[in-house]
Structures are given as structure tokens and as C-alpha cells.
Amino acid sequence: MRTRPAGIGSFNADWMGSLPSKLSAMPLKHLAVPGSHDSFTFWVDVHAPVGPDQKAYVKYLATIFSVLAKKVMVKWSMTQVQCAGFCCQLVSSKPGEPGNEIYFIHGLFGHKVRDGLSEINSFLGRHRKEVVFLDFNHYYAMDAEHHAYLISMLQEVFGGKLCNNCAVESITLDYLWEKKQQVIVFYHHPSAQGIPIMWPGNKIPAPWANTTEPNKLIQFLETTLQERAKQGTFHVSQAILTPRVNTVAKGLVWGLRTYLVERNLPTIMSWVEAQRPGVDGVNIITSDFVELTDFANIVIKLNNRLLSEQERKAR
């Protein structure tokens, strides 16, 4: 479904398939793509052990206060209410659990990775022209066997939908549609070297501002966008604020969404709305709690500016 012949479809589940042919022929690195940060943290388990990604004092507090402390952690671990895009995934094995099972993690353990991947694969089966980026970049309590298990799982779940590592500039939607490929996996670990369907992490840099201040975040996003590599990579703009220990202490009962994200969303979204994709522009933009605004639609509509530029050049 399209809003107009030369525009972007408003039904976001099929937005890539609704793009005009001029855009589907462009390198994906030049398109604006919405994503979400730690996408699978829309559910975490308060009864599971604290994740190995946490500092010693957090584990100590969780040991003393048990479920009460973990309920506070939930408010600061969940970055999404529903699963959206799939960038910047953190994964871990679970202490005391036999076998090589791996879980999504962000402070607390979430869903099994296999369940999340199956959910994505089911979506892609229903929407044959949609493409997802899976960026696995933090691993905890994982040895060589865990990595082999995860890589094998990715191959098993997605099969022929996986796109082989190649020149970033050659990846267009038209190219992927012709090959019936829908998944690009970035695997930031030596275990994936030499495996054709595992893209190296340096092909999807995602600079992290690590700040609680929206103005510093915007300045960082602008600077890193100007420094974006001209060749050979995609680019992620992480439009996210990161809580510090004193942030959590001040907003203990409110949580990440209420205390940090909601109050600063207008500033962040104003920056997003002002962007343009293209050679020197934004590519993948990620955010927390993407359902709080019309985030996906706003990012997708940025691609209309590429059409406007092409029309001006054609005159």
C-alpha cells in the first residue's frame, strides 16, 4: 500500500517493498532505516540470575534484595515495550543451565535467542521484500562452543535468507530481492571469521555517545555522522541516552522510560526529523522505546528527500 505513487508506504511492515524503484536500486547504505536498541529487552525474567554484563555491586544488591532489586532493574533494563528492529543485540549463556542455550540479555536475562530468531524468520516469511540487520556485538559467559552453537543456529533458522558478506556498495534492495535474501548478520567476534554469511562488525559501526544529556547526544550524533566512512560500511546513529549510577539512584522508582527517555524525546526526535539520508547522510537510526512516537514512520519518510533531490537534478 502506498500513500502516493512516488512516496513511502504507510504500512510499515512492508515499507521496503513499497519503496519506489529509484530507491530500491540505491545502495542500502544510502537509505534511512529505522531500528531499535536492544530490541529483545521487551521482556526480561526477574526470577533468573542477574546477567554477567552487570557490575559486581549490582550483583551484590540483587543477591541481598533478590526479586525486589530485580524489579527495579527491570525498569532500567527494558529499552523496548515491543520488539521492533534488531540492532545491537547482547547475548549470553545462563549460569547453571546445561547445554549451550543462549539468551538475549540486558541486565537481566530475556528470551532464548532461538525463539527471537524464529519470530523474525516468521515475519520475513510473511513479508518477502523486507530486510533486517542483525547486529550481535556483545557476548557474555560464552566460549567457543557457544559461538559455534549460535552461528549454527543462525544458519539453521534463516537458511537461504542470509546474505553473504560482500561489498557494502553492491547491496541494494533490488539485489537482495533477486536473490531472495532478507537477513544481514553482523557478528563481532573472531569465531565468525571466514564464514561467508557472517559479516564482520567493522562493516556496521555504531558510535555510542554514552551520555544522559540530550544536547551532548545531538552533538555526538552530528560529529560521528560527519566522520562516517565514505566506503565499505553501513552506519548506525544511536539516538539513545545511557543512564549512569546516579541517574538510576535519582529516578529509582520511575525507570528508564519515564525518568530519562520520555522527557528528552522531543529533542531527540527533532534531530531525527531534520536528517536526510544519502551519501553523507543518515543510514540506520536506532532509539529506545520506539513505540512512544511515530519513530519508524518518521525515519522511513526521510527517504522521500532522496526522491526530491533526484527530481531536482533531473530538471
Image (cartoon, rainbow, N blue to C red):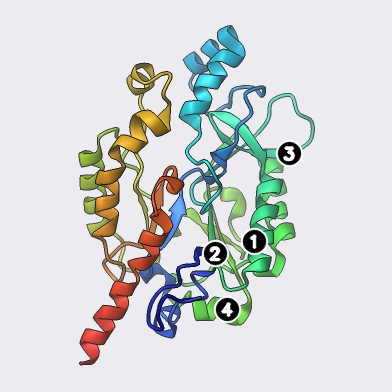
Q: Are marks 1 and 4 in contact (CB under 8 Å)?
A: no
Residue farthest to the top?
A: 64
Q: Considering only order in the chain, which callout, 3 or 1, is on the residue closer to the N terminus?
A: 3
Between label 2 and label 4, give the one nearer the viewer: 2
Residue 301 placed where, x, y %? Answer: 36, 67
Q: Residue at x 50, y 34 (%)?
A: 78
Q: Which residue is mark 1?
A: 123
Q: Residue at x 35, y 43 (%)?
A: 208
Of the numbered discs in the image, which one, if any, rests on residue 13?
2
Q: Which residue is mark 4?
A: 177
Residue 48 placed where, x, y %? Answer: 66, 24
Q: Which residue is mark 3?
A: 101
Residue type at tag 1:
Phe
Helix, strand or loop under label 3? loop
Q: CA distance from mark 1 to mark 2?
A: 9 Å
Q: Residues within 10 Å of mark 1 (few under 14, many from 20)?
A: few
Q: Considering only order in the chain, which callout, 2 or 1, is on the residue closer to the N terminus?
A: 2
Residue type at tag 4:
Trp
Q: Look at the image and tell me whether residue 212 can be seen.
A: yes
Q: Quadrant of residue 266?
A: top left
Q: CA distance from mark 1 to mark 4?
A: 16 Å
